[in-house]
Image (spheres, rainbow, N blue to C red):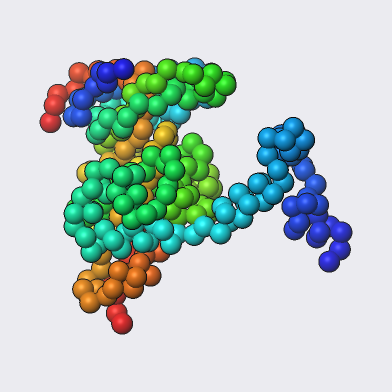
Amino acid sequence: MKAVFNPGDAVQVRRGSPPGHIRTPFYVRGCKGRIERIAGEFRNPEELAFGRFDAAKTPLYRVRFQQQDVWPDYNGNSGDTLDVEIFEFWLEPSTADKT
Amino acid sequence: MNKQQINETSPENAVPSTYYQFMEISVRELLIEKGVLSEDDIRQAVEAMDSRGPELGAQVVAHAWVDAQFKQSLLHDAPSAVKTLGIDIGPLQLMVVENTPKVHNLIVCTLCSCYPRTLLGLPPDWYKSSEYRSRAVREPRAVLREFGTEIPDKVEVRVHDSTADLRYLVLPQRPAGTADLSEDELAALVKRDSMVGVTVVPEYSC
């Protein structure tokens, strides 16, 4: 399965709240970030959690967020960042300009 | 020792109190009964887990400090690099992140307690606490300060939330004044907390 996104691409995390075993933290849903790297392909944990061990492998990314974009009242420095591992089906292209 | 103390301190006599404890015991007994595992297999696995400390992680860090080429391959492909040291990390998807004068890395698993156990041993209780897990992503500099770690304003704090298949190890900065130390002496300076990123390796004075 070819990865849809490349390092540097602007992405936005889907805003869904499906039931089940979700590895996308709630606090980054809806947030915009950039692909830091393609971390490989792994079986979908949302399927594995229900014993479906032959679940298809799906690309996993490390997505880098600016802390200020995640927490509007972030009390650290403006350059501080947060890297989170997110599966491809949780990501959408974002319209943010490349920097 | 009274009966209550025996119940609390000995796994054999522990009285299960939660659903998950009952389930663990039931599954364990079934696996033994059906011959999938023996009691001895389980005991050995628990002992191996308990005996592991952060020594292997420290060994990896010290080698990266003295061998620039190894460091590059460690940052690029940690599982392959670690293998060249004769360390077997099994299927662990290790990723090493480097502290530099510009970036300080901090590791957390907000969803549970993912941790590179093969290299660092069992995670400390605070790493598994809901307080650390929620605050490390929300106010990392305040958390670091509580560990006695003040990161200068000009340095970026980069938090890694270990949410999926990767496990993280921080490569701390080598302290000044350590040019004459052997690799083993360097490894002795590297403590668990500095490889999680809540502390830095302190300045060296002999």
In which quadrant is the N terminus of chain A drawn? top left
Hey, which residue is sitting farthest right in the picture? B3
Q: Camera-side residue: B130 or B120?
A: B120
Q: Position of residue B109 (x, y in %)?
A: 45, 41
In this picture, residue B3 sits left or right of residue A1: right
Give x and y (percent) for residue B94.
Answer: 37, 43
Closer to us: B84 or A55: B84
Vertical arrangement, residue B42 with respect to residue B163, above or below: below
Figure disc tally = 0
| Residue at 30% over, 63% down | B62
Q: Residue at x 35, y 35 (%)?
A: A84
Horizontal and vertical percent position of residue B34: 74, 32
Residue drawn at x 23%, y 64% is B66
- B121 left or right of B95 in image: right
Residue B197 occupies quadrant: bottom left
Residue for point 34% across, 44% down: B79
Query: For the view shown, which residue lies furthest in the bottom direction?
Result: B206
